Image: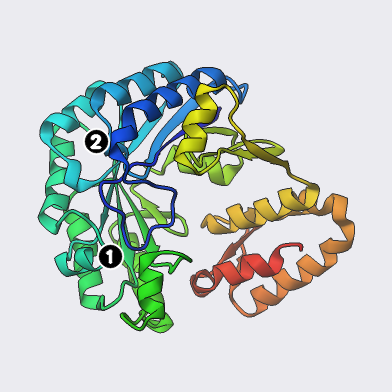
């Protein structure tokens, strides 16, 4: 199986925390779509396997007309597709639009809500309000979409634990199937980072951020949800198939400006520049970059992707990845055992290594330590 990702970079307004490639040049959507269709036709068989999942992300895909989205999906082909996801901004939601998405084959919706607190939405530059967020979910359900994910964010400036608990309860009351939750990251070059550096806002302290995350995990578990990846929770049977393919090393093709592809052992990516992408595609001379992953790279990928999964990594596969670098096996094993002794990692009865709840708080540090430079 293979995945297919389509990047739609257009946004009516940039969020203050976002560092994904995006543009507010809405007038260029049609020519961009034409370039996308050309790239899809040229590359849709590149993975050499049936396309099982399709993901339309951004940016804001819901800024596209239904006719353009239909062309994109039909050009890829959906004969083998089990999951077709599209991201949507609540500010774009109408019942008519939701019904049209359902008709053209979208069977999973990812709604970028982030918070149900209006003051927090304004602070991070979102263009919707809490009521629009709730109504977007309800309209999607009325339109027949029964696999709905929402994004929520925690550790936002001024956010309280009471607000975070209220957001989780509101999400549960909406009867959705999937929740992705992300702690705010102050990415280089974003407006929110500049505001922090200028003293215009104060980040949430690490202790409060960890408490918010722990409460999230505990509350969703109590409600019967499965925690299957560090930031992702689902009702049984509703884990994201597309995102799971990334974490499992499944090949995927990415089209559009800034999109990445992976067909083992080669990773490639398109330029994150609108002009370079459109002109390159239309001139049949797109300057894509690529790299062939070494044994060390493949090991590092395995550590990074599988420790983010709550069921962790298999020790026998770990040895397989390290076999070409036998000198590193002892060092990595020693570090893993040290983290187990410190109760940050644990060894499961079926031979896996995974993070403990405490370990999840510093997972990035653990992953970095276990990687080979």
Residue 233: x %, y % from top left: 38, 54
> Left or right of 161: which side holds 355?
right
Q: Tell me, what colour scheme is on the image?
A: rainbow
Residue located at (47% from left, 43% from top): 243
Q: Which residue is mark 2?
A: 146
Residue found farthest to the right: 327
Based on the displayed image, in which of its 4 quarters is residue 177 positioned?
A: top left
Residue 1 vertical placement versus 165 (above, below)? above
Asked whether 56 or 161 is in front, the reply is 56
Res 255 visible: no
Residue located at (30% from left, 76% from top): 157
Return the disc, 2 or 1, that comes first in the chain's sequence: 1
Asked whether 295 or 170 is in front, the reply is 295
Residue 335 vertical placement versus 54 (above, below)? below
Q: Residues within 10 Å of mark 2 (few under 14, many from 20)?
A: some
Q: Which label sits on residue 292?
A: none
Mark 2 and mark 1 residues within 8 Å of each other at the beta carbon: no
Q: Which label sits on residue 124?
A: 1
Residue located at (21% from left, 63% from top): 121
Residue 106: x %, y % from top left: 30, 29
Based on the displayed image, in which of its 4 quarters is residue 123 positioned?
A: bottom left
Asked whether 47 or 80 is in front, the reply is 47
> Left or right of 275: which side holds 167?
left
Residue 83: x %, y % from top left: 39, 30
Which quadrant: the N terminus?
A: top right
- Mark 2–mark 1 Cα distance, whole angstroms, equals 29 Å
Residue 373: x %, y % from top left: 76, 63
Residue 22 vertical placement versus 367 (above, below)? above
> Left or right of 44: which side holds 207?
left
Q: Secondary structure at mark 2?
A: loop
């Amino acid at each position: 199986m293979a995945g297919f990702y389509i990047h739609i970079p257009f946004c009516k307004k940039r969020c203050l925390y976002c560092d994904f490639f995006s543009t507010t040049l809405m007038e260029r959507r049609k020519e961009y779509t034409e370039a996308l269709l050309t790239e899809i036709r040229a590359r849709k068989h590149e993975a050499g396997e049936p396309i099982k999942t399709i993901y339309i992300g951004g940016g804001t895909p819901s800024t596209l007309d239904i006719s353009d989205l239909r062309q994109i999906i039909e050009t890829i082909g959906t004969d083998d597709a089990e999951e077709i996801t599209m991201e949507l901004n609540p500010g774009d939601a109408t019942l008519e639009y939701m019904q049209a998405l359902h008709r053209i084959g979208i069977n999973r919706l990812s709604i970028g809500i982030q918070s149900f607190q209006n003051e927090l939405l304004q602070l991070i530059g979102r263009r919707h309000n809490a009521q629009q967020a709730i109504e977007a979910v309800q309209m999607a359900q009325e339109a027949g979409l029964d696999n709905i994910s929402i994004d929520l964010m925690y550790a936002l400036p001024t956010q309280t634990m009471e607000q975070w608990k209220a957001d989780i309860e509101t999400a549960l009351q909406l009867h959705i199937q999937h929740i992705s939750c992300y702690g705010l990251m102050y990415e280089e070059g974003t407006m929110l980072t500049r505001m922090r550096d200028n003293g215009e806002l104060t980040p949430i302290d690490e202790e409060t951020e960890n408490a918010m995350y722990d409460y999230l995990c505990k509350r969703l578990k109590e409600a019967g949800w499965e925690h299957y990846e560090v930031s992702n929770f689902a009702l049984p049977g509703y884990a994201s198939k597309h995102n799971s393919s990334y974490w499992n090393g499944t090949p995927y093709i990415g089209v559009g400006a800034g999109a990445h592809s992976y067909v083992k052992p080669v990773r490639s990516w398109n330029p994150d520049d609108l002009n370079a992408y459109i002109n390159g595609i239309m001139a049949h001379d797109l300057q894509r970059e690529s790299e062939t992953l070494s044994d060390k790279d493949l090991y590092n990928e395995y550590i990074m992707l599988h420790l983010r999964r709550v069921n962790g990594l298999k020790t026998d596969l770990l040895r397989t990845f390290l076999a070409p670098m036998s000198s590193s096996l002892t060092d990595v094993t020693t570090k893993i055992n040290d983290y187990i002794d410190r109760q940050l990692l644990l060894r499961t009865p079926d031979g896996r290594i995974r993070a403990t709840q405490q370990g999840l708080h510093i997972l990035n540090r653990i992953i970095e330590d276990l990687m080979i430079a």
